[in-house]
Image: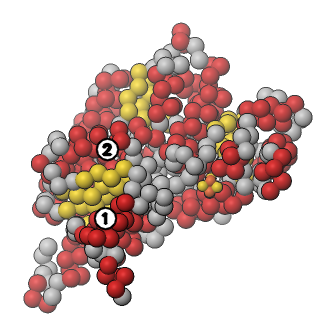
Amino acid sequence: MKTEEWINTEEYRELNFARKALVINPTKACQPLGAFFCASGFENTLPYEHGSQGCTAYFRNNLSRHYREPFPAVSDSMTEDAAVFGGRANMIEGLKNAYSLYKPALIAMCTSCMSEVIGDDLKAFISNAKDEGAIPKDFPVAPAHTPSFVGSHLTGYDLMLQGIITTLGEEHFDASKKTDKVNLIPGFDAHVENIRELRRYLEMMGVDVTVLADNSETFDSPLTGEYHPYLGKTTLAETADCVNAAATVSMQAYATPKTLADFKGKYEQQVAAFNYPLGVGGFDAFLTRVSELTGKPIPAEITSERGKAVDAATDAHPYFHGKRFALFGDPDLMLGLTAFLLEMGGEPVHIVSTNGTKKWKKEMEALLSSSPYGASATVYPGHDLWHMRSLLMTDPVDMIIGNSHGKYAARDAGIPHVRIGFPIVDRVNLHRYATLGYRGAVNLITWIANAFIEEKDRTSDDAHFELLR
Ligand code: SF4
């Protein structure tokens, strides 16, 4: 009992923040999970991990739990002998089996910690597999080295995307054959409905877009009684051609640095990067930039949708004003959510991102200092949800926003928890709702305001249990 009370004190918080050699409940996942997520958006593409089965089981399990969909992926099952002699034999047999059994058009290959620690060279082993006839010489295998002892699922997403574009597109690049298409990279976005929404807006503007990559069907497929293992919507032909597009827009700058650098440098394109542009202001900036890049105006039907979102924000504004928030998750999501809360008059207080960097902290602080509502905030890169618990117990807030892993800290602190991010494994269907766009803004406003109202109803005594809220 004494310990239970002690871990809620300032003294414990200081000790907790002095911790160096242990991470507890981090707000990030492994690199290959991001690589699998990325690969699943491409047509007839099989995610393949050169490593141990346990890692692949964990990634499949995490993705299946969040989306409540099966997730097909393979590993070449490295065990102790591969750790000693290297994984070349595993890869040759694995590629042969994967190619003949699952008949993909592309294999997207990443690594795990084990194959990275022993130093396996993907390109050399893939070439060996082709020389030995395990797969045809011209069969595309896109490699990405994704060691999880550095980086996070965002690094893996970026490296896999870069690997696939290089494998399919590099030889098609021709600066004299530029198209007027725009590449749109959604990033590691847990709410796959966002991809459909982004397509809808760009269609209304008449923008010819290639989404790199569209996994909206993979993670939200119809239940028809028939199983299709490959539902990625981005075709391999349009991926090969994406290097000749006029411009590339990333919705998540921190999930796409290497890929964007290639588009800007190697493929000589205009690039624009956003930080998960949530809320009305964030989406205004996105559409304005797309309009500048393409010369296409924003049509009246979009302006009308925007007006509805502004109306919803005005109606809900009193429920946000002056409320204190704790946020956790990926760096881009934190920037997007913070901008949205500041726009609504909410006060972000504790912001934790395990995969946040010093550069991200500076960007967060610049954003917070742009509004009087940001004055009480502290930004914590490289911290985890056990740090967050200490913050909530010693400096209370009114709500926490983040993925399902925040529920323990929320319960201990006795505050409502709105689920946004990855993974969400204790609520249903949230990935089927957009968070981006003007409709997405209405969803965010509704979830957060109603969570406060429900909390008020739940905690009111009889004298204050009002019909109107
Ligand atoms: S940390 Fe490394 S070994 Fe562990 S699951 Fe992730 S990739 Fe596999």
The image quarter containing residue 120 is top right
Which of the labelled discs sits on residue 14, or is there none? 1
Q: Can residue 280 be seen in this view?
A: no
Residue at position x 21%, y 72% in the image: 453
Quick one: 252 or 20, which is closer to the camera? 20
Label 1 neighbourhood size at 10 Å, few (<14), some (14-19), many (20+)?
few
Residue at position x 39%, y 56% in the image: 383
Ligand 1 position by quadrant = bottom right
The image quarter containing residue 177 is top right
Left-right relation of 265 to 142: left
Label 2 neighbourhood size at 10 Å, few (<14), some (14-19), many (20+)?
many
Q: Earlier in the sequence, mark 2 or mark 1?
A: 1
Q: In which quarter of the image is the C terminus?
A: bottom left
Position of 278 relative to 24 (above/below): above
For the rendered model, the colour scheme is secondary structure
Cα separation between marks 2 and 1: 21 Å
- Identify the secondary structure beneath mark 2: helix
Position of 235 relative to 421 (above/below): above
Q: In which quarter of the image is the N terminus?
A: bottom left
Which of the labelled discs sits on residue 361, or is there none? 2
Q: As drawn, which residue projects farthest toward the right?
A: 132
Q: Of the residues shown, which amino acid type is indicated by label 2?
A: Lys
User: Are the two marked residues, 2 and 1, in contact with CB atoms closer than 8 angstroms?
Assistant: no
